[in-house]
């Protein structure tokens, strides 16, 4: 008894299975959707993939993702160019932009120091950051790497490079997230919230 | 203050958002993965999409999905051609094939009757099924549409067309799924399990 097989469909499912957190069932569901699409949508989808991959590159100034030579933040004159917020990844920029309160420029490291994974300082966009500090425009660098061991180590490493230049270096505050229950907060967060406590006026 | 925007990335995320049960966050995750892919993988992915959509069609005999003229089940001589199992969708064929006990041929309706959604009998592959019953090869038609109102209605409609031809029409058994707890079974399933009870030998 031969099996029911459709090679072209299996190849498509395999392609979708390569995506992060997409298992076989989800991949199959995505593939079925492709089969059910009208032809012009399929062409558009396939072209968008190629175009996005081809056109998206790193901003020449801040190393953030952009489809132009200089990203929309760096080319925006209304941004406060005296503050650079250093993040690990372009997704962090998107998260910070969502606050709508942060009229600064960014610098995207595109990674964190991680000796265990072989990520060394020269693999991150650190020299591009130092180049931006050469004239006297920048007054403050905010280290906004993640609150993880690697993020913390990266922040400390870069701070040590920048401080001798006489530029103020700050780090995002640690503490309880808004809406958090003390009962469920982990002890490290709680210890940081205590040590970083502010006087009530 | 201008926003941080990457038009090519936004277009890609929008494309992924069109997929079923893919929200904005998942779409963004899939899009980021595309950006991180090596160029040859992106080309392959995009071509697989186009190829699958172009090459996959309905089998000329059973209306199942195939990338050949006649699907691998219909062209398999070891299959019992005297039994046709009628299903709604090619996914049902995949599910039934997983049992590895079902050496029959299939007929895929590619839908169910649903007056509320405007699905009428001539929109399903019913005439192709009737054409297969014209010679005397087929002795039994198993109605394996889903156990839903529409699936049931479709099974009854097609049964009424086939019975006058003197061909045996059967329906998959209803009852408790294996491993089910009586306590949690719904009353319709339980009623069907009671009315369909079998004598213990």
Image (spheres, coloured by chain):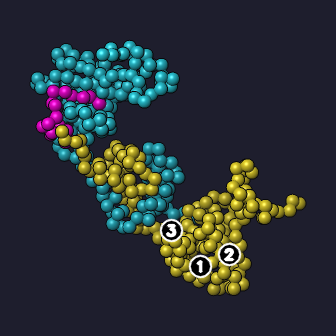
Chain colours: A yellow, B cyan
Q: Is disc 2 on the same chain as disc 3?
A: yes
Q: Which residue is mark 1?
A: A129
Q: Chain of mark 1?
A: A
Alpha carbons under labels 3 and 1: distance apart: 17 Å
Alpha carbons under labels 3 and 2: distance apart: 22 Å
The image quadrant of residue B157 is top left
Of residues A116 and B73, the one nearer the viewer is A116
Q: Which residues are magenta?
A: B71-87
Q: Which residue is mark 2?
A: A141
Q: For residue A66, which numbered disc appears in the image?
A: 3
Residue B25 pos. (x, y %):
53, 52
Residue B119 pos. (x, y %):
35, 28
Q: Chain of mark 2?
A: A
- Residue A110 against residue B160 in the figure, above or below: below
- Residue B155 against residue A28 in the figure, above or below: above
| Left or right: B111, with A126 as reference point | left
Q: Assess whether residue B80 is covered by the magenta stretch.
A: yes
Q: Assess whether residue B129 is covered by the magenta stretch.
A: no
Q: Secondary structure at mark 3?
A: strand
Alpha carbons under labels 2 and 1: distance apart: 10 Å
Point out the tag, 3 or 1, that comes first from the N-terminus.
3
Q: Quadrant of the C terminus of chain B?
A: top left
Residue at 20%, 32% in the rendered image: B104
Residue neighbourhood size for the residue with mark 2, other residues' Cα within 10 Å, grouped as few (<14), some (14–19), many (≥20):
many
């Amino acid at each position: 008894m031969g099996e029911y097989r459709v090679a072209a469909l299996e190849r498509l499912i395999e392609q979708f299975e390569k995506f992060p957190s997409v298992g076989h069932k989800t991949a199959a569901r995505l593939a079925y959707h492709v089969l059910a699409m009208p032809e012009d949508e399929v062409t558009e989808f396939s072209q968008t993939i190629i175009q996005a991959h081809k056109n998206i590159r790193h901003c020449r100034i801040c190393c953030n993702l952009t489809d132009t030579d200089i990203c929309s933040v760096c080319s925006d004159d209304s941004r406060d160019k005296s503050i650079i917020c250093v993040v690990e990844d372009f997704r962090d920029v998107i998260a910070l932009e969502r606050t709508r309160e942060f009229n600064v420029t960014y610098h995207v490291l595109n990674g964190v120091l991680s000796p265990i994974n072989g990520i060394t300082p020269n693999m991150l966009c650190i020299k591009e950051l130092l180049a931006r500090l050469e004239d006297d425009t920048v007054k403050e660098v905010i280290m906004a790497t993640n609150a993880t061991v690697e993020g913390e180590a990266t922040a400390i490493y870069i701070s040590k490079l920048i401080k001798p230049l006489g530029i103020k270096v700050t780090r995002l505050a640690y503490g309880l997230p808004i809406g958090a229950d003390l009962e469920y907060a982990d002890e490290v967060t709680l210890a940081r919230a205590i040590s970083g406590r502010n006087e009530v006026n």
